Amino acid sequence: MLTALPHPVWHPLQHFRARMNQWFVNRIAPRDTVTLTQRNVYILPTAPGFMLGATLLVLLVASINYQLNLGYVLTFLLTGSAVVGMQVCHGTLRGITMHLIAPDAHFAGANVTIGVNLLSDRRSVRYGIGLAVLGTQHWSWTDVPAQGSAKVQVAFQPQRRGLHRVPALTAETRFPLGTFRVWTVWRPAAQVLVYPAPEQHPPPLPPGEPRAGGQATVQRQSTGEFDGIRPYRRGDPLKLVVWKKTAKTDELVSRDAQQVQRFELWLDLAHTGLSATAGTSGGPALEQALSRLCAWVLLADKQGLHYGLRLAGQEIAPDSGEAHKKNCLQALALAHV
Amino acid sequence: MFNALKTLPREARDTLFLLAVIAWIIAPQVNNLPLWCSAMAACILLWRAYLAVRSFALPSRWWLTGLLVLATGATYFTHRTLAGHEAGTTYIVVLLSLKTLEMRTQRDAFVIFFLGFFTLLSNFFVSQSLPIALAMLLGLLGLLTALVNSHMPVGRPPLLQAAKTAGWMALLGAPIMAVLFVLFPRIAPLWGVPGDTPGARSGLSASMQVGTIASLALDESVALRVRFNGAPPPSSDIYFRGPVLTTFDGREWRPLRSAGLPSQQLSAELEVQGPTVSYQVTLEPNNRPWIMVLDATASRPELSGYRATMTPDLQWIADHPITELVRYSAKSNTAFRHGPQGMAAGLQDYLNLPANYNPRTLQLARELRRDPRYAGATTETLVEAVMQRLRTGGYTYTLEPGVYGTHTADEFWFDRKTGFCEHIASSFVLLMRAMNIPARVVTGYQGGQMNTVDGFWTVRQSDAHAWAEVWMAGTGWVRVDPTSAVAPSRIGSLVRLEAPRNVIAQALARVNPQFTVQLRALWEAANNSWNQWVLNYSQSKQLDLLRNLGFESPSWEDLTYLLIALVVAASLVGAAWTLWERHRQDPWLRLLHGATARLRRAGLALPDSAPPRQIATLLQDRTDNDGPDLSAIGHWLLRMEAWRYAPHSHAQQLATLQREFRSLPWPQRIP
């Protein structure tokens, strides 16, 4: 399970419970839309529920001992209300249809928001329904209006890149008396793509490579025509700095003359400076290298450059734009070396 | 005020509501709580309300601990114990109010709710009357509302919404309550708590001091209710016998404390005559062992849980004080003789007079004895002479006679000439004894009022009365009611002297005197049904119910079985409902499935999820390929589709479709 971190101290009971929960979750068929019925809604008394039971017992004993007929009335009315409350509690969740809104791709370490639509065809409002990722305590509460729908958002934090299944969710209610907990566990079928986390302070973009078949030896020929801009590099003459753009973005940008025509920006796993150890073994160095590539892709996209991505055994031809960026990020997310 | 409430943040509003509910459930018992407890609870609740309105922080735990220690100590010093219902009530009220200062987590809130339920119950130690029950029902709904409200975490839902949910829950829970109340076996107390009988309630007293009955005379609360089988006896014969007072020390009348030998004491020697009056009495708890029955009752009244015995002076006594509402049947005869026929040694006790009291009364007795008119007169004549004096001597009946001095009889006979039954009876008996006629004071209730709503005869504490019994040779004890001579209307008529009423009651009575009587009759009837059906619902009534249900010899085990059977039946109904709900479908879908099933039976291959238009097309194909004419079904299916996807579909149209479904020419066989 994605969120189930190993307990620091091995505890037989907790271990057993975790295993039980795991088994329990795994036997639920994954679905993106689920209608809650008698079969998948569970109910158990809460601690206050047991407290109410004890209270009722004491009230009953007091009524018997002091022969208070009105005490019996009070005790039994409270019992009746609690029994009805149990039904109401179960009914609050039963009959709801939950519909998952497929989440967008996210970067590892960032919160992924999962939207859930709750639909009710009942003629009364359903109060106090909470949703959370199974195993966490971050509840988002909502009321579902009569014959209407409500949207709830829960978040989870994927730690690793890749294609992940949306974690199991749980919906819960304790309305109206808090004496019973009614809940359901739901395994959505949708998957969420998680990009590598972009490196915080990446080194500058690598220098361009000469276009295949071009004049590799020809260095910059200043023809006075500027074809594009690129980030400031040490040694650029001050007159090449585009000050207007710099003022807007707070980054030094230089004019790039003709480079685009002859040089192509390739973001290459081998050029990250971390690939020496990355090699074939994968592991943390590879992840770090992918993080750097990710940061570069974002940087290049931000500057509107043409760039290509080269991974072990995979190459994406230079291009620009949103779709290209997504392609590259997806390749990074799913890269395995 | 209301607007200010509306603008409060939700938390403050919820807290204020809960505080109001708590105040409401503590309020009815404020009179029975120690003063410090009521004051402390009020202060804490007000303080908490102030904190809530101003959104100030709650006091620290040190404050709470200090207050808790103080309250525990005060409870202990007030009651000398922490056990028992009085100390328990005090302590719970204090705890409940203190806990409101510590409402930090959900758990704290729950503790408040549960303490609130205990406080609700503690009100019933004091009173189980109808108004208290209604007030506590409101209190319970208030607590449930607050509880429901605390489980609506989103936004700021109106309290009315929570109240509605709570109300529905209570309403739907009421049948469960009714079944449990009727069938839960009433068992004896599991254990007794020493010194824990409910506080004394007003009633007749065991002794009579001038002035004690004065307060009772103003008390309009009900002492007992009677349902006569048949016509009630004349009101002037309705005397419920209470304690008989014989020994007088100049200030106070007490029951007989004889100086003579036990063997010399008089026995009842009761002989009843005439028609027997049979009736049922519902006696309010009087905290005394007195069983109120009509004069005179020869056969033992049957009370469950009590053993009744008759004293030599004709009073019926239970073996322990009556602390709860009891109901019993009795048979009495208003015509009877009792007491010794001839002079007996025991009669000496009824002639004793305290020394140095009432010299002028003794003088009056001597004068009467010396009066030539009464020379050799019988006791009867002498009694009549004194009664005549009461009638014509300018004596008046009043509820406000003022405080009497040392010589009460002298003051009555000569100075004030006014008083109520107890002064009159006491003075009369003293005069009789001074004339050497054995006499005694009898207390009890006289008269009453027929409730026209439910036909019950109601006797109130204000019907408490004192009269005299005089011993006559050859007859025994004879009842003489001297009050009837002073105020004939006091006896034998429904019109009684009433206590001064408050302004509203006076105004009401002026507008329509019948109205107040009617209103009171209605109220009394409601109260009486309450007593009969709720407060007096006992094990014997439970067993009666079982007998009516056809059990041969019911026991409390049968009650348990019946209860279990009902629970099982309810569970089965619940399970059936669940099954039914699982198979419940949209009526349109069911109709479509019906059509699909019929067509399949006729041999048409149809997928499960075939929509009406697809089926209609299929049918059209068959019709075109020289099959039977299925166009009617096809049109019907298209109408089905139209109904389903119409912007406004009406249930009536669906009903039409259902009717058409039954009359359609369904084919037997589709080739």
Image: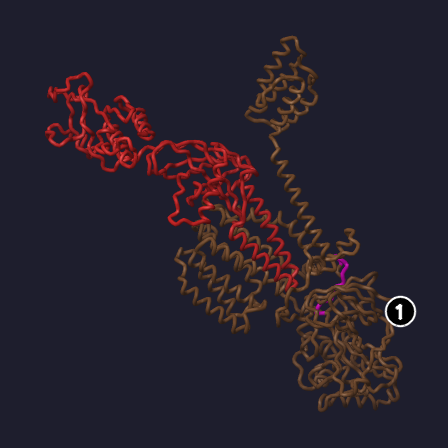
Chain colours: A red, B brown
Q: On the rendered structure, is B85 left or right of B451?
A: left
Residue stretch in magenta? B452-462
The residue under the point 40% across, 41% down is A3
Query: Which residue has dot 1 on it?
Result: B274
Q: On the rendered structure, is B566 left or right of B608?
A: right
Residue B364 magenta-drawn?
Answer: no
Task: Examine the rendering and report whether any part of residue A51 can be seen.
Answer: yes
Q: Position of residue B293 (x, y in %)?
A: 78, 69
Q: Position of residue A256 (x, y in %)?
A: 16, 24
The residue under the point 19% across, 23% down is A209
Q: Position of residue B333 (x, y in %)?
A: 85, 69
Task: Examine the rendering and report whether any part of residue B516 can be seen.
Answer: no
**Which quarter of the picture shows residue B558?**
bottom right
Work out whether residue B575 or residue B306 is closer to the camera in this orientation and state it. B575
Q: Is residue B38 above or below residue A322?
A: below
Q: Is residue B418 above or below residue B144?
A: below
